Image (spheres, helix red, strand yellow):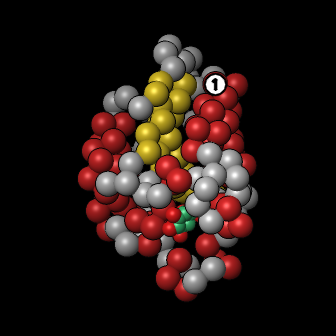
Amino acid sequence: MTSTTAPARGTLLILNGPNLNLLGTREPGIYGSATLSDVEALTTAAAESAGFGASCLQSNHEGVLIDAIHAARGTAVGIIINAGAYTHTSVALRDAIAAVELPTVEVHISNVHKREEFRHHSYLSPVCSAVIVGAGIHGYELAVSALDKTLS
Ligand code: DQA
């Protein structure tokens, strides 16, 4: 996990779920050529220019993501999450987001609604403040922008 210090407006937790560590080499026709490091750098830069800090974590493990969401209560002012395939399977992640009551933006790099039917349903969307799909990695910057407004 990387973090910045002393942000004027508090810290945003940037969470990426399973297989997103493979960005850059994973199905580039769908997800593009940017790496996870690129995504974290652009999201952190967007957060910092809005006066936030950013704390970035990627994990392939559902429980690690849940623990990070729990820890955000009291340490972060908002969450940006691309939960990868857990989006479509995890009631536990949904319950964690609902429990911490932080504004949370769900991001998907691809337009999940143009893809297989099993990707059309998200357990997370009903407990998120905004959902951004299909904008590529720019979606993470749009998520910062959404939290900037929500938290102003
Ligand atoms: C994804 C879409 C999910 O369906 C998929 O399982 C991912 C990535 C996206 O960013 O487009 O891992 O969340």
Ligand 1 - quadrant of the structure image: bottom right
Can residue 8 be seen from the camera position used here? yes
Q: Residue furthest top?
A: 6
| Residue at 53% in and 77% down | 119
Residue 73 is situated, as x and y percent measured from the top left of the image, at 34, 36
Can residue 146 be seen from the camera position used here? no
Q: Hey, what amino acid is under mark 1? A: Glu
| Residue at 37% in and 29% down | 75
Q: Residue furthest bottom?
A: 117
Relative depth, front residue between 132 and 85: 85
- Residue 110, located in which quarter of the rendered image? bottom right
Relative depth, front residue between 35 and 85: 35
Q: Is residue 49 left or right of residue 91?
A: right
User: How many residues crowd mark 1 within 10 Å: few (<14), some (14–19), many (20+)?
Assistant: some
Q: Is residue 148 left or right of residue 6?
A: right
- Residue 135, located in which quarter of the rendered image? bottom right
Residue 39 is situated, as x and y percent measured from the top left of the image, at 62, 42
